[in-house]
Amino acid sequence: MSAGSVLIVCGKAEMASSMQTMLIKEGFYPVSCAHSANEARRNFFNTVLDIVIISTPLPDEHGTDLVFDVHEKTSAGIVVIARPEHLLDMQCSLEKINALILPKPINRLTLLQTVRFALSVRNSMAELITERDSLKKRMDERKIVEQAKWMLVEKLNLSEPQAFRLIQKKAMDLRLPQVLVAEEIIKKYE
């Protein structure tokens, strides 16, 4: 099983190839390389990325704009490798998007640990987003059921428990989710 897909963005082909070989040996697949920001942006549309490693500066831009584009257009974890004199500026501008920033030169073990940490953070965020979306859906459905319940209270002069029981019973009888029954009630009485 693959540890995750990786895009390496680095202006130096030899360095990119070295990182690619190391990551493949560590179980990451597919691992592709782009040698400019524009080439990297084209890769966003072709591959689902788990991790993007950007070694700055790039031949066609510094790399900060690319980091923001990766954050905006993918759900990938981001690792930025920068010259020591650029670290403070990059940390200030990139800290809000959870990009991990490492100083050059970088050793193999540090890069590997950082990539694995970025992947872990990315996976945790994906789980939280899924959970949030599920909770939002359930809350939206609950609002619809509540709206239908109060319509029944108002239109049929039922008590609140009676109205809710009516929705529940109709849903069970028709073998439908309560939200679908509630939507029909809302349509009927609007």
Image: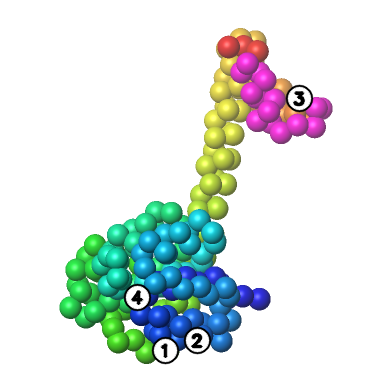
Helix, strand or loop for disc 1: helix
* Residue in the image at 56% along x and 87% along y: 25
Q: To which residue does mark 3 refer?
A: 170
Tag 2–tag 1 contact (CB < 8 Å): yes
Q: Report x, y in % for residue 66.
A: 34, 61
* 178 relative position to 128: left or right: right
Which of the marked residues, 3 or 2, is nearer the chain's N terminus? Answer: 2
Q: Amino acid at mark 2?
A: Met
The mark closer to the camera, 2 or 1, is 2
Label 1: how many residues lie within 10 Å, few (<14), some (14-19) or many (20+)? few
Residue 11's tag is 4
Which of the marked residues, 4 or 2, is nearer the chain's N terminus? Answer: 4
Considering depth in this image, is 35 or 69 the residue closer to the camera? 35
Tag 3–tag 4 contact (CB < 8 Å): no
- What residue range appears in magenta? 173-187
* 144 relative position to 171: left or right: left
In whole angstroms, how far apart are the C-alphas of marks 1 and 4? 18 Å
Q: Amino acid at mark 3?
A: Lys
Which of the marked residues, 2 or 1, is nearer the chain's N terminus? Answer: 2
Q: How many numbered marks, from 0 up?
A: 4
Residue 97 visible somewhere in the drawing: no
Considering depth in this image, is 105 or 143 the residue closer to the camera? 105
